[in-house]
Each structure stands twice: as structure tokens, then as C-alpha cells.
């Protein structure tokens, strides 16, 4: 059997245990490597100067740190930075760093493409190619952390990049462990949010196994007829089952559920939609996160004008719903999910 090179980030504890055993090293060597990766933000074995030189050279050959390459790095005036990564195993993914006062939020992907087919979204236009590995998810976090200045620190993780996180929980959960662990990125679980199209069985699994993260449900419509059109997988799930699972998750986790609502002009932004949405969520410990649509080249959807947005907000608030409008960050660098990869693909075609 060929000895596959281990990807360190895929299963850090296991890889480092194998590494220490192979070289007859004491256990503290593993902690040194962890510290270099997560705290001291190193990019290569060579820089881990408290390891003996021959060990660094041998390790670089047998235990590569990175399996992606940066295909494109874009920056916006508001501090948003976006990476388009080429995966050694094939495909491209995107991840984003957002700056807002002291917050440093990273947005990460979980799949190459997406299988959910939401009609307004760039990520799912060509379906899903594959799930990302744990290592590829951890790697996005580390690469984004490398963009920070020495005085900056990652504070939040949102799993809202390309892909459906709950369709890849097996790889995602160990990656989020690394985000949360004190010898990892040391980010508090309540500052880690998983955004899902709403897959009840996976929400239930999360409630059983790891109800510590915040959950955001991409609702986008207040009734099944409209949701079936915008979010095709809804057809075999239905709003009632999703909200039931979300209620259960809230019960177990004690964390308020966020409902995301992409506002599409003339589609789901009418007064009756706001009223119906308020009714659907009445009595729940919920926050509605309204996201004015980020137009995608080639798709027919538009962002409603500011007046319509304000009216939608007013109707929800009047009905007692807690509302937050997501600020437009990184528009000019195609920061909405899947857009950078798509614009790159389009440029290549042209
Ligand atoms: N699959 C997951 C997470 C990825 S998408 C989910 O559905 O939640 C993260 C959020 O961005 C979702 O609410 C998604 O509907 C929204 N979104 C996708 N494309 C968008 C666009 N062009 N403009 C604004 N929001 C978008």
C-alpha cells in the first residue's frame, strides 16, 4: 500500500500523534506545533524555530501544512478581504474575512458548489461537486487568520460560505472543534454560527451531538408555496418540520435562532410577506436577519429599493419581531457566497 502523505489539518491530534511516535518525540512537541499554527500564525515548518532543524526539514517533507493555493485575493475599502482557493484535490472555494469595529469575522465554505439549488444563489448554479474535508475547512480559517495584523484577533466564525454545512457535518464538526478549542483558535462557541437551508434530520443530530453553536436558518419565504420556488429542497421538507427542529434546537441549546431572509424585489418583499413572516415566528425567541439581495450576474433577481426595505423592516418590527438588516459589506469584491468563483469562471469563458 502506498503511504499517502498525511494532511496535518485533517485530523491534527491524530497526525501529530503519528508524527511524535515516528520520530520518538515527547508529547510537548505536538503542543508546540499547535501553538505555531493557531497562535503564532506560522506558514511553514521552517519557521517553527523551537523544533530541531533536522526535524523541521523531515516534517516539511512528510507532513505538508497546506493543500490549497490562493488563486485570488481581493480587498474592499471597508476592510473585507476574500480568498479564492484552488484545492489540490480539485475545485475552487471561497472564504471571507469581515472587519467591523473590533469584530473579525470569518465566513467559510463547506462544499465545492452546493446541491440545494436556491434559485437566487451563485454557489449552487452548477450543483455540488463534493464535500470539503476537515482539513480544507480548517485551512480556510488559518489562511484568513494570516490576513490579520499582529494586533488583530479572530472573534467570530460564520459557516455561510459555499455549500450546505449540514450536508457535511462529519467534516465540519471536527473543524469547528479546532475553531473553538483553547489550543486552537479559541473562539467561544456562541460566536460560531452555522447557517443552513434547513435540514431537519441534521438539525436534530446537531441538537443531540453539539448544541453549542448558533444556528441560522435560511428561510427566505413565509409559506411553503413561495419557499418551494426559491429553495427547491423545501418541496420535500416543508416549513413546519424545519421550524419544529429549530424550536427543539433552541430548547436544547438555549441559543436564540436566527432566521435569514434574502430580500428579492417583487418576489418576497411585499407587505403581506412581512406580515406572514411575523405570524410564522410569533411567540418564538427568534431574530430575523434580513439580507438585501446581492445581484448575481446572469440571474434575474434584484435588490428592493431602500423604501421597500424600510417598509419590510417596519412591518416586522411593528408585529414585535426582532430584526437585523445585514450591512452590505464587500459588495464590490463579490463577497456574497459563490460570486467570486463565478466571476472568475465567467472571465475565463469570455
Ligand atoms: N447553505 C447554507 C449556507 C450558505 S449561504 C444556507 O443556505 O444557509 C449563506 C446565506 O447567504 C444564505 O442565507 C443564502 O441564502 C444567502 N445568499 C446566497 N446568495 C445570496 C446573494 N446573492 N445575496 C444575498 N444573500 C445570498
Image (spheres, grey):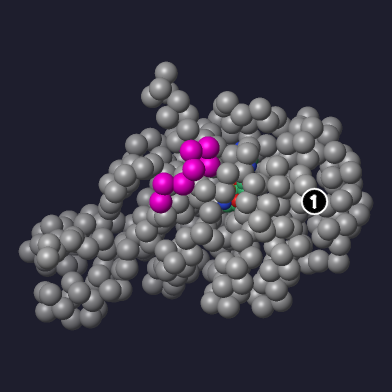
Q: Residues within 10 Å of mark 1 (few under 14, many from 20)?
A: some
Residue at 28% over, 47% down: 88
Name the outermost residue toward the top: 350
> Is residue 128 located in the magenta-colored stretch of the structure?
yes
Residue at 54% over, 69% down: 188
| Position of residue 197 measured from the top left corner of the image (x, y, whole percent) | 62, 54
Q: Is residue 155 left or right of residue 58?
A: right
Nearer to the camera, 16 or 166: 166
Q: Is residue 302 left or right of residue 223?
A: left
Please tell me in which quadrant of the rendered image residue 206 appears: bottom right
The vertical placement of 46 against 343, above or below, is below
| Position of residue 49 measured from the top left corner of the image (x, y, whole percent) | 19, 62
The vertical placement of 266 against 249, above or below, is above
Please tell me in which quadrant of the rendered image residue 265 appears: top right
Q: Quadrant of the N terminus?
A: bottom left
Residue at 44% over, 67% down: 170
> Is residue 343 located in the magenta-colored stretch of the structure?
no
Q: Is residue 137 left or right of residue 295?
A: left
The vertical placement of 321 against 85, above or below, is below
Nearer to the camera, 279 or 185: 279
Q: Which residue is mark 1?
A: 223
Q: Which residues are magenta?
A: 123-130
Query: Tag 1's secondary structure?
Result: loop
What secondary structure do most residues of the magenta stretch adopt? loop
Q: Quadrant of the C terminus?
A: top left
Kindly tell me whether residue 155 is visible in this rendering: no
Kindly tell me whether residue 124 is visible in this rendering: yes
Please tell me in which quadrant of the rendered image residue 190 appears: bottom right
Nearer to the camera, 278 or 244: 244
| Position of residue 169 measured from the top left corner of the image (x, y, whole percent) | 48, 65
Amino acid at each position: 500500500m502506498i503511504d499517502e502523505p498525511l494532511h496535518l489539518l485533517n485530523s491534527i491530534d491524530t497526525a501529530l500523534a503519528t508524527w511524535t511516535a515516528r520520530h520518538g518525540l515527547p508529547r510537548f512537541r505536538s503542543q508546540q506545533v499547535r501553538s505555531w499554527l493557531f497562535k503564532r500564525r506560522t506558514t511553514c515548518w521552517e519557521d517553527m524555530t523551537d523544533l530541531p532543524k533536522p526535524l523541521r526539514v523531515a516534517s516539511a517533507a512528510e507532513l505538508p501544512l497546506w493543500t490549497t493555493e490562493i488563486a485570488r485575493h481581493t480587498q474592499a475599502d471597508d476592510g473585507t478581504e476574500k480568498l479564492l482557493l484552488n484545492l489540490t484535490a480539485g475545485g475552487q472555494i471561497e472564504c471571507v474575512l469581515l472587519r467591523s469595529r473590533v469584530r473579525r469575522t470569518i465566513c467559510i465554505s463547506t462544499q465545492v458548489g452546493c446541491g440545494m439549488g436556491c434559485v437566487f444563489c451563485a454557489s449552487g448554479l452548477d450543483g455540488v461537486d463534493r464535500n470539503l474535508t476537515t482539513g480544507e475547512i480548517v485551512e480556510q480559517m488559518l489562511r484568513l487568520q494570516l490576513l490579520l495584523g499582529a494586533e488583530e484577533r479572530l472573534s467570530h466564525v460564520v459557516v455561510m460560505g459555499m455549500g450546505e454545512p449540514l450536508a457535511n457535518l462529519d467534516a465540519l464538526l471536527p473543524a469547528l472543534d479546532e475553531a473553538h478549542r483553547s489550543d486552537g483558535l479559541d473562539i467561544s462557541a456562541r460566536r460560531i454560527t452555522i447557517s443552513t437551508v434547513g435540514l431537519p434530520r441534521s438539525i436534530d443530530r446537531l441538537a443531540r451531538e453539539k448544541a453549542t453553536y448558533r444556528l441560522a436558518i435560511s428561510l427566505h419565504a413565509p409559506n411553503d408555496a413561495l419557499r418551494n420556488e426559491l429553495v427547491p429542497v423545501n418541496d420535500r421538507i416543508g416549513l413546519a418540520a424545519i421550524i419544529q427542529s429549530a424550536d427543539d434546537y433552541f430548547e436544547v441549546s438555549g441559543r436564540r435562532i436566527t432566521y435569514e431572509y434574502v430580500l428579492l424585489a417583487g418576489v418576497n418583499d411585499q407587505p403581506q410577506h412581512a406580515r406572514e413572516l411575523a405570524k410564522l415566528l410569533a411567540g418564538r425567541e427568534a431574530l430575523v436577519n434580513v439580507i438585501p439581495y446581492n445581484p448575481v450576474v446572469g440571474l434575474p433577481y434584484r435588490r428592493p429599493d431602500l423604501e421597500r426595505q424600510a417598509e419590510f423592516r417596519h412591518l416586522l418590527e411593528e408585529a414585535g419581531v426582532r430584526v437585523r438588516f445585514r450591512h452590505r459589506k464587500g459588495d464590490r469584491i463579490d463577497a456574497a457566497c459563490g460570486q467570486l468563483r463565478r466571476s472568475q469562471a465567467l472571465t475565463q469563458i469570455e
